[in-house]
Image (cartoon, rainbow, N blue to C red):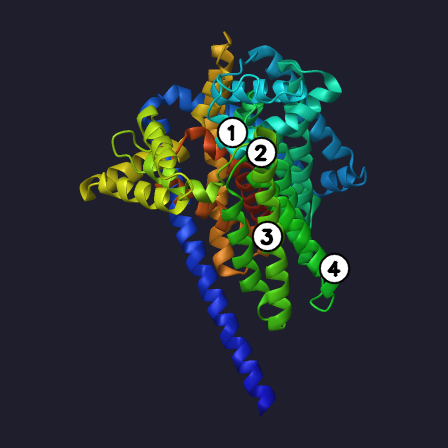
């Protein structure tokens, strides 16, 4: 009788977890995926003519159909798999070669805070990080910019301080991210096909290629972010009874997510997504104390690694540095400005700096003041328009990635050609994300997939209230590519289930 009660309780718990997961997936399907498809489609309809749609539709088909044909043909893929790692080495080589070509062709100039990152790295290299502080007075307050410069300074120690060195390092990071995407896709889908397809899509994605010449923190954040989801996927293979390896895996994941915060302060969204995924997928199989231990290890390693960036920055600049959580009021002030549609303005930046200066060590008081000010400026009638404008800015295109790559370049025609090609290519990827998520509702997906879906959903929600720039979407591109590749893989599986010929 007791055994039956235990089974019923476990079944009830699983039903609740399924319900919560499906609720999250339905939310994700509608926002941001379905709305993103609509925004991208409207962009094409409003700015393109019929001939242009046909031309670039044909170009996208030329790129994708051979890949689909290779993946769908069992005999071809079997022969490719016999060569072991040769296909992924070819894709990583393709990613690096394309980036080298376009970085040389476009010759992007470093501007704005990207230029400051380079100069700060040069100053750290020369042993005097405060040398040109008047040129970039806001950099010490932005931890993710400081740490990008800090890491870049080590690269300069090896190869010399120059923009060419910085771009070479970014090209290497692009190749590394491509390889890690392959590993993550292969691990999650348990097939090389999905990993190969995801890596190929990331390798040829025009916006990412063109943006390689811009020393943004995203390039530094992507490798630990993708590696974290790969190791998280590996934990699914570990038996619940193998407790020490579980603890080690989650400790490494926490460190990697903390490293993401060093370069782009979005690790908190990823750690929340991972925790929710663990609770839904592991709660029924782990004893409570074991679940508590691995979640504690995950949180502690994450927070300690994330906070380390602040301590490093403070030691370099000998001044107090605010963490991302201590700047929430500032982010809300800028993000909820109905006049600027959430884009940073000099006026809001000045207000925030004055508030922190006025309140001194009372960070909580400054936070409360800035949050109250942000809400007071927002009228109810403006909320809908503000959110709509911000959503379209982020999800309808990757224009800012191309625009930044054009700074200092005369090769506008080539970049605009790449921009148009990606408009349809990424629409196809988004449609496959939608397709895969629909399937995930019917059957429980891999916990790493659910974590990536939650991360993108959390990012979309955060961008509605925080300051926003179109280039911020760069951080979700690897996970989006992986989810799109999973959708393509599901299409092949459905074809096999229908017993359609593959050879």
Q: CA distance from mark 4 to mark 1?
A: 38 Å
- The number of discs equals 4
| 370 relative to 100 in the view: left or right | left
Q: Earlier in the sequence, mark 4 or mark 1?
A: 1
Q: CA distance from mark 3 to mark 2?
A: 32 Å
Neighbour class for label 3 at 10 Å: few (<14), some, many (≥20)?
many
Image coordinates for residue 193, horizontal then vertical, percent: 67, 42
Q: Quadrant of the C terminus?
A: top right
Q: Which residue is mark 1?
A: 140
| 363 relative to 3 in the view: left or right | left
Q: Earlier in the sequence, mark 1 or mark 3?
A: 1
Image coordinates for residue 307, horizontal then vertical, percent: 57, 44
Task: Tell us which disc is closer to us: 3 or 2.
Answer: 2
Q: Residue at x 67, y 21 (%)?
A: 127
Q: Earlier in the sequence, mark 3 or mark 2?
A: 2
Q: Which residue is mark 4?
A: 245
| 483 relative to 88 in the view: left or right | left
Depth check: give the residue in front, 476 or 495. 476
Q: Which residue is mark 3?
A: 448
Q: Which residue is mark 2?
A: 313
Q: CA distance from mark 3 to mark 4?
A: 18 Å
Neighbour class for label 4 at 10 Å: few (<14), some, many (≥20)?
some
Query: Tag 4, which secondary structure?
Result: helix
């Amino acid at each position: 009788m007791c055994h039956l009660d235990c089974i019923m309780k476990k079944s009830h718990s699983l039903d609740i977890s399924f319900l919560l997961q499906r609720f999250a997936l339905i939310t994700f399907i509608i926002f941001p995926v379905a709305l993103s498809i609509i925004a991208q489609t409207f962009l094409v309809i409003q700015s393109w003519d019929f001939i242009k749609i046909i031309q670039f539709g044909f170009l996208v088909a030329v790129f994708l159909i051979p890949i689909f044909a290779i993946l769908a043909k069992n005999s071809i893929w079997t022969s490719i798999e016999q060569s072991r790692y040769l296909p992924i080495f070819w894709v990583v080589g393709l990613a690096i070669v394309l980036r080298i070509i376009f970085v040389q062709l476009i010759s992007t100039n470093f501007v704005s805070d990207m230029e400051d990152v380079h100069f700060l790295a040069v100053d750290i290299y020369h042993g005097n990080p405060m040398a040109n502080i008047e040129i970039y007075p806001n950099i010490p307050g932005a931890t993710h910019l400081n740490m990008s410069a800090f890491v870049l300074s080590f690269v300069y120690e090896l190869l010399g301080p120059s923009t060419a060195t910085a771009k070479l390092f970014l090209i290497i990071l692009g190749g590394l991210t491509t390889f890690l995407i392959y590993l993550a896709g292969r691990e999650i889908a348990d097939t090389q096909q999905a990993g190969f397809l995801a890596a190929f899509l990331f390798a040829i994605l025009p916006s990412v290629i063109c943006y390689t010449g811009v020393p943004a923190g995203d390039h530094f954040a992507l490798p630990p972010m993708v590696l974290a989801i790969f190791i998280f996927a590996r934990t699914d293979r570990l038996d619940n009874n193998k407790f020490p390896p579980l603890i080690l895996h989650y400790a490494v994941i926490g460190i990697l997510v903390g490293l993401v915060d060093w370069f782009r302060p979005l690790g908190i969204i990823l750690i929340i997504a991972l925790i929710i995924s663990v609770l839904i997928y592991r709660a029924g199989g782990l004893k409570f104390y074991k679940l508590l231990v691995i979640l504690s290890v995950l949180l502690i390693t994450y927070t300690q690694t994330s906070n380390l960036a602040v301590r490093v920055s403070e030691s370099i600049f000998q001044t107090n540095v605010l963490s991302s959580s201590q700047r929430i009021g500032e982010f809300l002030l800028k993000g909820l400005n109905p006049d600027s549609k959430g884009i940073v303005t000099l006026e809001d930046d000045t207000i925030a700096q004055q508030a922190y200066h006025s309140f001194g060590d009372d960070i909580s008081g400054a936070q409360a003041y800035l949050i109250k000010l942000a809400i007071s400026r927002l009228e109810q009638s403006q909320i809908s328009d503000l959110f709509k404008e911000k959503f379209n800015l982020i999800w309808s295109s990757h224009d800012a990635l191309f625009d930044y790559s054009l700074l200092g370049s005369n090769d506008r025609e080539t970049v605009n050609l790449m921009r148009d090609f990606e408009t349809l290519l990424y629409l196809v990827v988004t449609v496959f994300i939608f397709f895969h998520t629909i399937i995930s509702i019917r059957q429980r997906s891999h916990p790493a997939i659910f974590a990536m879906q939650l991360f993108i959903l959390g990012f979309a929600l955060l961008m509605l209230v925080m300051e926003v720039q179109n280039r911020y979407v760069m951080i979700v591109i690897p996970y989006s590519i992986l989810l799109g590749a999973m959708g393509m893989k599901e299409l092949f599986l459905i074809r096999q289930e229908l017993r359609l010929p593959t050879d």
